[in-house]
């Protein structure tokens, strides 16, 4: 599934005055660009978007491939509001629903095909999920070197839906490919395989593309897609505005590696509401 780069960091950017004020020149440029994009996005014509969707065609084939790591990057970005909706629907904790948004570095083949689901197959109310069993290990600290502070905390820029050890979505029903949280599924899932980037419509690889879609369904999907686009931009803007940069040192990188050897990852998650420190 499509993911935007949510990190507001860029090395060696901005003047000392910008850094002292808590924002680099690059971050201020990002914030300004996002504000302009949001303004334009709100004026996009849903009828034109619906016409594009209808021309492309789409009907879900219930194959479940978009939820399975074996078929590609299946990370699903979540806003804090989406996490809360899923929590309310499932009665699960925040960390049972979501984890830090990190690069797609899991190795699903290591888990094997016989792994059982972590959620009961026939339950409409989600029971507890073992966080340690569903969390994904921080395998390669080198990939996130620029996101580690002097204390060894790994900084992540947003949340993503939890995945099982084999990389599949934790809410994917094993044999039927049904979604256990379908009524409150994230915006990214409800508008897949379509997404908007830079005010243009794009599609992800999907077996359902090219199949007939009605004008009514096209309009409904267009409305959801525009709502998602603006919501994601607003959420990212709020995160950037709250974000405060941090120092990077080799010492912090070594601390993170030592923590990993002990089976622990300490994250600082930046989102539109501020920061959250978690041990995963």
Image (cartoon, rainbow, N blue to C red):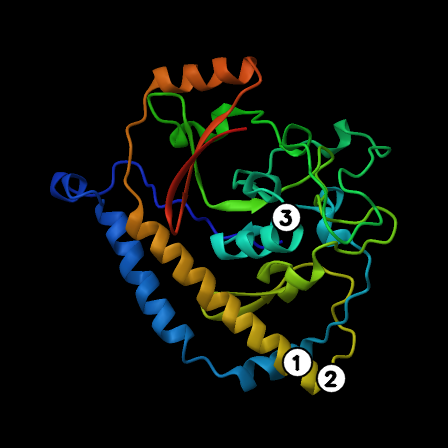
Query: Between residues 140 and 233, which one lies in front from this camera angle?
Result: 233
**Is label 2 in a helix, a strand or a loop?**
loop
Circles 1, 2 touching at the beta carbon (< 8 Å)? yes
Mark 3, Cα crowd under 10 Å, few <14 / some 14-19 / many 20+, is: some
Q: CA distance from mark 3 to mark 1?
A: 33 Å
* Picture coordinates of residue 181, whole percent (x, y): 70, 56
Residue beneath the point at 56% across and 77% down: 223
**Is label 3 in a helix, a strand or a loop?**
loop
* Picture coordinates of residue 21, whole percent (x, y): 15, 44
Q: Earlier in the sequence, mark 3 or mark 1?
A: 3
Residue beneath the point at 55% across and 86% down: 47
Residue at numbered disc 2: 214
Report the residue that reaches farthest toward the left. 17
Apparent side of residue 271 relative to residue 81 in the rendered image (left or right): left
Residue 198 visible, this orientation: no
Residue at numbered disc 3: 91
Q: Relative to 185, does residue 45 appear above or below in the rendering?
A: below
Mark 1, Cα crowd under 10 Å, few <14 / some 14-19 / many 20+, is: many
Q: Relative to 68, does residue 231 appear above or below in the rendering?
A: below
**Is label 1 in a helix, a strand or a loop?**
helix
Residue at numbered disc 1: 218
Q: CA distance from mark 3 to mark 2?
A: 36 Å
Q: CA distance from mark 1 to mark 2?
A: 6 Å
């Amino acid at each position: 599934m499509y993911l935007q780069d949510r990190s507001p960091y860029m090395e060696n950017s901005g003047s000392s005055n910008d850094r002292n004020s808590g924002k680099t020149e690059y971050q201020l440029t990002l914030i300004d660009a996002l504000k302009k994009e949001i303004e334009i996005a709100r004026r996009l014509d849903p009828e034109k978007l619906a016409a594009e969707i209808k021309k492309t065609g789409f009907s879900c084939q219930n194959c479940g491939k978009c939820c399975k790591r074996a078929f590609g990057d299946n990370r699903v970005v979540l806003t804090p509001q989406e996490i809360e909706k899923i929590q309310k629907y499932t009665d699960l904790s925040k960390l049972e629903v979501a984890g830090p948004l990190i690069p797609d570095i899991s190795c699903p083949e290591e888990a094997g095909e016989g792994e059982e689901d972590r959620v009961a197959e026939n339950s409409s109310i989600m029971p507890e999920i073992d966080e340690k069993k569903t969390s994904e290990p921080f395998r390669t600290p080198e990939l996130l070197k620029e996101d580690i502070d002097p204390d060894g905390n790994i900084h992540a820029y947003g949340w993503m839906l939890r995945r099982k050890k084999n990389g599949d979505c934790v809410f994917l029903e094993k044999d039927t490919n049904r979604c256990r949280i379908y009524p409150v599924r994230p915006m990214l899932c409800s508008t897949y395989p379509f997404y908007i980037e830079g005010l243009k419509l794009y599609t992800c690889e999907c077996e359902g593309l090219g199949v007939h879609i009605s004008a009514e369904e096209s309009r409904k999907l267009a409305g959801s897609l525009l709502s998602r686009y603006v919501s994601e931009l607003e959420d990212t803007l709020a995160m950037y505005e709250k974000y405060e940069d941090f120092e990077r040192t080799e010492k912090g990188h070594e601390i993170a590696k030592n923590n990993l050897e002990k089976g622990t990852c300490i994250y600082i998650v930046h989102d539109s509401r501020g920061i959250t420190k978690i041990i995963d």
